[in-house]
Every structure is written in structure tokens, then in C-alpha cells.
Amino acid sequence: MICISIVPETNEEALSLLARALPRADRVELRIDRIGEPDLPLLLHAGKERILVTNRRRDEGGFFASCENRRMVLFREAIDLGARYVDIEARTGAAALGRLGKAIRAKKGKTKLIVSHHDLEGTPSRQTLVRRFKACRALGADIVKIVTLAQTAEDNLMVLELIPQALAVGQDIIAFCMGAKGRLSRVAAPLLGSCMSYASLEEGAESAPGQLTAQEMKTILGILQAP
């Protein structure tokens, strides 16, 4: 499943990007962390059943500059409006994640909770990766997301190993590496069973280093999956 990630600065730009991205991908990640006052009713009306709402913290590569309470209010609003997914960092903490899980259950589980961990500096050991996976899972994740920065080609293999391990215990997962050396994992992850592979709408619109365009992803996956 290809998910185009967009990082608009205004509601108007978000609407324009959604209109372009939704026809080109299975899902669209709407990063609201750069929008001062996101109009979620307006934005989710564009296709909430296919939109993933992310409000990324600065310490995990995002831009959200307001208080944590405001960030959580926006997540709750996205859930109340029926967003297909919300992505929230494991570092947010068990109490806050528990409240979001309760809000999701109150809406009969229409929204799936992605609990994520991003390492912007490198890729830790296999043991650390497994611990992070288990920690995200314990926080009630419908989908665990583990992303690291690849500094060597071998880093891709360590992160990709999480995918069959997760599937073996019935846990949906997104796992890949960022950076130029992580491109391999972006293509391999969906072939191994990762829920989503993130792509940019076009060249120059990447939301993370090493991201391919949606068209590049479709072309490469089409070749690899051809009979």
C-alpha cells in the first residue's frame, strides 16, 4: 500500500495537495504539524476514509510548535471526525495514548492507531529494535511503526527483520529506513508485508530523506511483482 506524505503550511495548500495526492495513492498522510490552525473538518471531508493524520513532534522530525495539550486536542478531533488513521509517537506516553485508544473505541474503532518511533540519528542494535517494537505494541497500537536512519546497507536488513517477526504474532507493522542508504528498505518493506510504504507526491516534495516518488514506487513494485 503506497501512502503519499504531504506537509502543507496552510489549509489551502493542504486541500490542493490532497486533491492531487488522493487519486495517485492508496492512502495519504496529512502532516498537520506545519499548519498553524488546521481546519480538520474541511480537510478530512476530502476523503477521511483514506487519510492518515500525523501531528509530528519536533524531536521526531516534525514541526509542531504549540503545547502538547493542543496537539492531543487535534488528535482527538481527527478521531471524532473519522480519520482512517492517526500516527502518534510512543514517546507521547502511556496515559495520553490510553486516552486516544479510549476515544477510538468510543467511535467503534473507525480510526486505526499507529504508534511510532523514529530514530533520526541511526539504526540501533537488533535487541533495541525489538524492544522498541514491543514497547509500541504494549501501548495499544493497531499498527506499530519503526523508522530509523540507515547509515549502512546492513541497517536495512535489521529493520526489515521486524516485519516477519511482527506478522508472526499477528501485529500489523510499518518498518523501513530513511536516508539515501535506506531506499532499499522502502521498496522491500511492502513486499515483506509492511502495511504501508511512504512516498512523495513528486520529486522535491519529500517529507523525509530517501523518499521515492509515488510513481517511482509504483514502477519498481510493478516490476518486482510481475509474474
Image: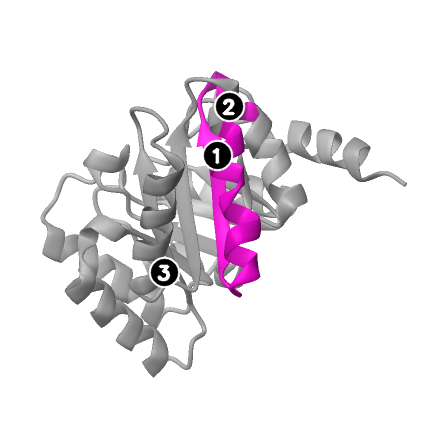
Q: Is residue 15 above or below residue 125?
A: below
Badge 1 is on which residue? 158
Query: Three-letter amino acid code at disc 2?
Result: Glu
Badge 3 is on which residue? 137
Q: Secondary structure at mark 2?
A: helix
Residue 177 in the magenta stretch? The answer is: yes
Q: Estimate the x, y position of residue 99 in percent, counting from the top left.
A: 21, 71
Can the viewer see residue 45? yes
Q: Secondary structure at mark 3?
A: helix
Answer with mark 3 or mark 2, whichever residue precedes in sequence: 3
Residue 108 in the magenta stretch? The answer is: no
Badge 2 is on which residue? 154
Q: Are marks 1 and 2 in contact (CB under 8 Å)?
A: yes
- Between residue 201 and residue 119, name the one nearer to us: 119
Q: Are marks 3 and 2 in contact (CB under 8 Å)?
A: no
Q: Residues within 10 Å of mark 2 (few under 14, many from 20)?
A: few
Answer with mark 3 or mark 1, whichever residue precedes in sequence: 3
